[in-house]
Image (spheres, rainbow, N blue to C red):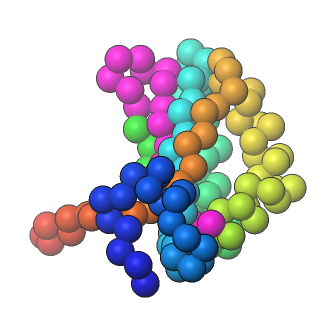
Amino acid sequence: MVDVTGLDSSALETMDCTIEAEVIGMMFGTVARYVLKPGHEKQFMDEMGSFETDPPAGWVYHTAFRSTKDPNEIWLSVVFESEEAYKKNADSPEMDREYRKMLDHLQSEPEWHDGHVIHEAMRQSAKS
């Protein structure tokens, strides 16, 4: 496996096909930006909970953030085992239905910023 830590997206795009093929096995996901209609956060987050109770194939985790500047602005990072799993989910009829429901809670179309996970770190919680 090729270590791509520290490479920006333009460097990854210029790598030759052999190295690109090795990158494909990496986890993949998106950082999405949503601007909610006022008063819709609870219902929006409740509906997003279906990812946790009935996750799509290849889903690894997601993290939601609320902006400190605008309480109606939510960012969501979603990670899948691979780019293939991510795209299969994104192109599925189930996700299309969920997306259309989600639009009821938004002021505008979401922004999507897709990419390979090139680094992650998480501290284990202290045990009681």
Q: Is 21 placed left or right of 57 in the picture?
A: left
Residue at the extreme right of the image, as rendered: 93
Q: Residue at x 67, y 69 (%)?
A: 85
Who is closer to the viewer here, 29 or 20? 20
Q: Is 119 placed left or right of 91 in the picture?
A: left
| Residue 13 horizontal/vertical position (percent) | 54, 57
Residue 61 visible at all: no
Who is closer to the viewer here, 16 or 32? 16
Q: Residue at x 74, y 27 (%)?
A: 104
| Residue 110 horizontal/vertical position (percent) | 64, 31
Residue at the extreme bottom of the image, as rendered: 1
| Residue 65 horizontal/vertical position (percent) | 40, 38
Q: Eyeballing the image, is 16 above or below 79? A: below
Q: Is 61 placed left or right of 104 in the picture?
A: left
Q: Residue at x 61, y 58 (%)?
A: 51
* Residue 38, picture quadrant: top right
The quadrant of the picture occupied by the N terminus is bottom left
Is 74 inside the magenta-drawn segment? yes
Who is closer to the viewer here, 71 or 21? 21
Is 73 inside the magenta-drawn segment? yes
Magenta residues (range): 66-83
The quadrant of the picture occupied by the C terminus is bottom left
* Residue 35, picture quadrant: top right
Residue 110 visible at all: yes
Q: Is 86 placed left or right of 66 in the picture?
A: right
| Residue 111 horizontal/vertical position (percent) | 60, 33
Q: Residue at x 47, y 36 (%)?
A: 75
Q: Eyeballing the image, is 1 above or below 117? A: below
Q: Eyeballing the image, is 15 above or below 73? A: below
